[in-house]
Amino acid sequence: MWILPLVGYIGSIVGFGFMTLAIASGLYYLSELVEEHTVVAKRFLSKLIYSIMVLQLLLCAVDRFPFWLTVLGIFSHFIYLGNMRRFPFVKLTDPLFLTSCGLVLINHYVWFKHFSHRQERAYQNYSYYDTPDIPSFTEIASYFGLCVWLVPFALFVSLSASDNILPTMGSEASSSSSASVGGGGSSGREKKGLAKALVDNIRGAIAGVGAVTGLKKPEDRL
């Protein structure tokens, strides 16, 4: 067969493109939703962090998850909780924010290594008459989704860079006075979520590449 594998490759590329667009649209919508309901989002994220910490304690006590890895996971969520003190604004150079980013990668690595070693040990001691006591792919994926990636992903969607904070009362007064004298002018830059800014930057980059290559006119919108 020659044509069918080619169709498979083309279909995979098209499917990946649609999936990427769907994820970008979802991030954009969630970011705007958080901007409109900041108080509700902060309350929801705080309760979510505490719930996951309790869930990790239950997994350690009942399912005998590793103690020190559980301590690392709870400590990581405690650090994530520190980002809520100035919600939804965050400094990208804030040590607490940078520590949170590092803990996300560390948690992913140590838990991936733990489940991999557990499967290797189970299959080494596996016999034909025994059923290996290992978590399924669905259980592992659910743990990573809920206990490792959910809170960092929610914070990424919800937090806004401090460079885009709305102007203070003093700056608003000065901008309004200058607007009344000059007959126009903007009141300042609006806040923008990290996910929303990322999507806008990617759209701008794609539009720039299209303009350079001649695929679209510079005045056309993406």
Image (cartoon, grey):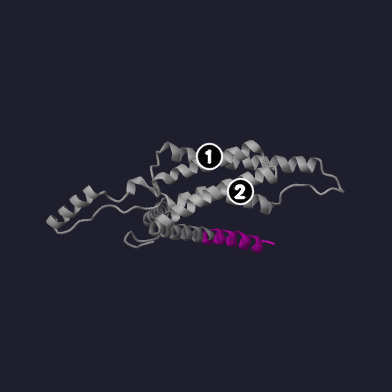
- Residue 88 on the magenta segment: no
Residues 167 and 71: in front is 71
The magenta-colored residue range is 1-18
- Kindly identify which numbered label has been placed on residue 55: 2
Report the number of numbered marks. 2
Residue at image point 43% right, 36% down = 95
Vertical order, 131 against 30 (above or below): above
Q: Where is residue 170 in the image (x, y as percent from the top left)?
A: 21, 48
**Residue 206 visible to the viewer:** no
Residues 53 and 179: in front is 53
Which is more foreground, mark 2 or mark 1?
A: 2
Quadrant in the rendering for residue 220: bottom left
Q: Where is residue 42 in the image (x, y as percent from the top left)?
A: 44, 52
**Mark closer to the chain start, 2 or 1:** 2
Q: Please state if 214 lies on the left or on the right of 66 as rendered.
A: left
The C terminus is located in which quarter? Answer: bottom left
Q: Position of residue 137 (x, y in %)?
A: 68, 52
- Residue 16 on the magenta segment: yes
**Residue 176 visible to the viewer:** yes
Residues 24 and 104: in front is 104
**Farthest-out residue, right:** 129
Residue annotated with mark 1: 103
Residue at image point 46% right, 49% down = 156
The kind of residue on which mark 1 rests is Leu
Quadrant in the rendering for residue 200: bottom left
The secondary structure making up most of the magenta span is helix
Q: Please state if 210 lies on the left or on the right of 119 as rendered.
A: left
Q: Position of residue 144 (x, y in %)?
A: 60, 48
**SS for callout 2:** helix
Q: How far apart are marks 2 and 1 (CA)?
A: 18 Å
Residue at image point 18% right, 55% down = 176
